[in-house]
Amino acid sequence: GPNHYVQAVNLLVRVYSKTGAALTAPFKLNSLFGALGGLCSTTNSGDPIVLYDPLANKWLLSQFAFSSPTSPPYHQCIAISQTPDPTGAYFLYDFISPGNNLNDYSKFGVWADAYYMTDNQFSNGGPFNGAGVFAFDRAKMLVGDNTASFVYFGLSTAFGGMLPADVDGSTPPPAGAPGYF
């Protein structure tokens, strides 16, 4: 972001100023989700994501969560900063992945109409089951609306390691331009 650098490595997150001064102590990502409760607040399953949304001047932090890698449900925990300051408060979301697909190796992209995500899916944590593509309701998430939802499509096992398009910079994509994977 313009004033901060946020780094997530394995289970820990830390916020720095652009000059490199530490603004927080290292903290576990699940600690952001304390007010939400559930697995997102008690589990650090890994695959952390930090993404700056230049169109909204906010931060997205995410990781997946599960009780057991071989037993659904599988969760995608997403925190959206309420202001441009990543050391402040966050809007919190716990989305359940569809079916019995472990949502491994998730990757996010900012787009004007949604937060897009891909994952590598594993049926009950076992055999590879293709890629999942998601579009999360960015407009609702940015204002803390707990009715935010997502659209999902599962792709065949011919797909894996997909990435969503991501806006870099303050110029949004043309109005109505679709998000690409």
Image (tube, rainbow, N blue to C red):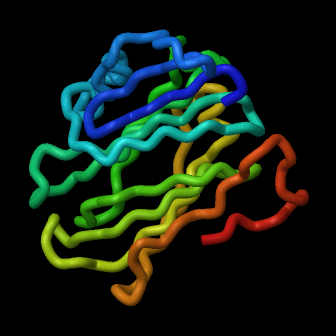
Residue at the image point whose x is 40% and y is 45% from the top: 95
State the residue lying farthest toward the right: 175
Front residue of 79 and 26: 26
Front residue of 73 and 76: 76
Q: Quadrant of residue 155?
A: bottom left
Question: Is residue 176 found left or right of 157 in the rendered image?
Answer: right
Question: Is residue 108 found left or right of 165 in the rendered image?
Answer: left
Front residue of 165 and 9: 9
**In this figure, what is the number of numbered marks?**
0
Q: Is residue 87 above or below residue 166?
A: above
User: Where's residue 61, x and y in %?
Assistant: 47, 35
User: Where's residue 149, x and y in %?
Assistant: 53, 47
Q: Is residue 85 above or below residue 166?
A: above
Q: Quadrant of the N terminus?
A: top right
Residue at the image point whose x is 33% and y is 18% from the top: 26
Question: Is residue 91 found left or right of 157 in the rendered image?
Answer: right
Residue at the image point whose x is 46% and y is 28% from the top: 92
State the residue lying farthest toward the front: 19
Q: Quadrant of residue 165?
A: bottom right
Q: Quadrant of the C terminus?
A: bottom right
Front residue of 89 and 145: 89
User: Where's residue 180, x and y in %?
Assistant: 67, 70
Residue at the image point whose x is 60% and y is 53% from the top: 109
